[in-house]
Image: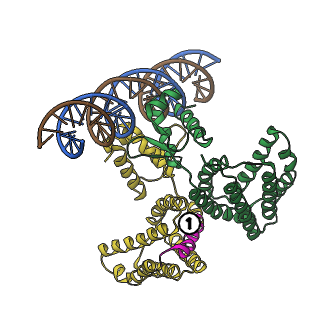
Chain colours: A yellow, B green, C blue, D brown
Amino acid sequence: MRASDRAYAALRDDIIEWRLLPGTVLAEVEQSERLGVSRTPLREALSRLTAEGLTTTAGGRGVVVTDISLEDIDELFELRETLEGRAAALAAERGDAALFLQLQKELLEAPDLISGADPARHEYYELVGRLDEAIDAAISNSYLAQAMRSLRVHLVRVRRLAADDAARLTAAAAEHAAIAEAIAARNPRLAEAATTVHLHRSLSHVKATHTPH
Amino acid sequence: MRASDRAYAALRDDIIEWRLLPGTVLAEVEQSERLGVSRTPLREALSRLTAEGLTTTAGGRGVVVTDISLEDIDELFELRETLEGRAAALAAERGDAALFLQLQKELLEAPDLISGADPARHEYYELVGRLDEAIDAAISNSYLAQAMRSLRVHLVRVRRLAADDAARLTAAAAEHAAIAEAIAARNPRLAEAATTVHLHRSLSHVKATHTPH
DNA sequence: ATGTCACCGAGTGTATACATAAAGGCGGAT
DNA sequence: ATCCGCCTTTATGTATACACTCGGTGACAT
C-alpha cells in the first residue's frame, strides 16, 4: 500500500472520528512525522482531503480541519434528500426486485441485532451499508453514485455527533425496510417518499441529540 | 500564481477543449517539460483533475484522459436534472425576485446578441453564466452549489461536442428566460418544470448534433 | 518453433534539499 | 509609551535525486 494512501486513510479517520477537531491546523512536517511518511505523500493526502471538503486551505498558511455547523447539517440533508430521493426512485425503476425483497426481510429482523451487544450492532451498520450499495448499483449512474459517495463522508462525520441509541436505530431499521419494500414493489414515488420520511426523521434525531464540540 | 495552478488550468483547458483526446496518457515527465513546471506541482495538478473525474489513474501506469460516452451523457443529464431542478425550486423559494426579473428581461433580449458576431455571442454565454451564479447564490446551500459546480466541468466538455447553432441558442435563451420568470414569480414547481423542459431539449440537441471523436 | 526466464528500461512513488513568502517579535525612533 | 520597520523564524512551494515496480523484449532451452 502506498504511503500517501496510508496517510490519507489515517487523517480521514482521525477527522471523521473527531479525534482531529475542527480548526486544527495540519502542519506538513508535524503530520508527516506523526504518520511516519515524508512530506510529498502527505501533501497528496491533504489535497485529497481538501477536495472532499474535510479540510480547507487557510490562505497559504496550512490546511485546517473543516467545521460542521448546524446550518451545514441542514444543507447536507437538503442535498441528501435531493440525491437519495432520486436514487431511490431510479432504483425502483431499474433495480432487481428479489434483491431488495431480501434486504427488506433482513432489515425487518434487524431489531434483534440492535438490542444485542456491540459486535451485533456493527453487523447492523453493515446491513444498512449493503442497502446503500444495492441502490448505488441499481441506479447504474456513476455520476449520481459518485455524488452520493462524496456526500456520505460528511454524513458519517455528522452521525458521530448524534447519540445512536437503540430506540432510534430500531425506528431507522423500519424506515430502511420501508424504502427497500417500495423499491422491491417497483414504486418510484413511494420509494422517494419513504426516503424523504426517513431523512427527515434522521435529521430531527441528529438535531435533537446534537452534542456541540 | 503557483506553478501547480498554472499546470492544472492548462491541462484542464486542454481536456475541456478536446485538445487532449480521451485515452491520452499524461506522463509526468513529458507533461512537466511541456508545461515548464517540475514533477511535484504537476502531480498535484493531475490529482485535482482525477478528483474531478477528468482523468483516471490507469493502475499505477500514469493517468489517462477520461472518455465521455453516450451513456455518460445520459447519466450526466440525469444528475443535472436532479440537482438543477431542485436548485431552481429552492431559488424560487429563497431568491431575490427583482434580480431574476432583471435576468429574465436581459434573456428575452438575448436573440439580438446571438444573431450578431462572435464577440456578442460570448456576451450571451456570460449572461447564462450570470443566471447560474444567481441561482447558486439564491439557494444558499454550499454543498448543493459545490455538486453543481463539479458537474458543470463535465457539461462544458459535452457542450463542445455539439454544434451550438443560432437556432438552438435562441430557443435556449427563451427556456432560460422561462426559468428566470418562474423563479421571479416565486413558483418552485414551475421553476423545476421549466428546468426539466430546458434540460431535455438541451439533451436532445446534444444527442442529435453529436459529433463522435 | 514455442514457451519460459532473466535482464533492461521507463515511469511512478518517495524522500529530501533548497527557495520563498508571510507572520511575529524586537528594537529604535518619534 | 507607542508605532513603524526590519529581521528572524517557520511554514509552504518547488525541484531533483533515488528507489522500486511493472512491462517488454530477447535469448536460451526443450
Q: Is residue B112 left or right of residue A38?
A: right
Q: Position of residue B36 (x, y in %)?
A: 52, 26
A169 on left or right of B158: left
Q: Position of residue A96 (x, y in %)?
A: 47, 76
Q: Quadrant of residue A156?
A: bottom left
- Above or below: residue B116 compared with residue A15: above
What's the residue type where badge 1 is placed?
A: Arg
Q: Is residue A168 visible in this depiction of the protein?
A: no
Using the image, determine if residue A127 lies above or below residue A15.
Answer: below
Q: Is residue A94 magenta?
A: yes
Q: Which residue is mark 1?
A: A80
User: Residue B68, can we see it?
Assistant: yes
Q: Main secondary structure of the magenta part?
A: helix
Residue D12 versus residue D28: which sits nearer the camera? D28
In the image, residue B27 above or below residue A52: above
Between residues A72 and A112, which one lies in front from this camera angle?
A: A112
Q: Is residue A170 left or right of residue B77?
A: left
**In the foreground, B82 or B95:** B82
Q: Picture coordinates of residue B122 (x, y %)?
A: 77, 41
Query: Callout 1: helix, strand or loop?
Result: helix
Residue at image point 68% right, 59% down: B203
Q: Residue B31 in the image: x percent, y percent?
A: 49, 32
Q: Quadrant of residue D16?
A: top left
Quadrant of image for the C terminus of chain B:
top right
Q: Which residues are magenta?
A: A79-96
* Residue at (53, 70) in percent of width and height: A207
- Determine if the magenta segment contains residue B130: no
User: Tag 1: Cα neighbours inside 10 Å, few (<14), some, or many (≥20)?
Assistant: many
Q: Quadrant of the N terminus of chain B?
A: top right
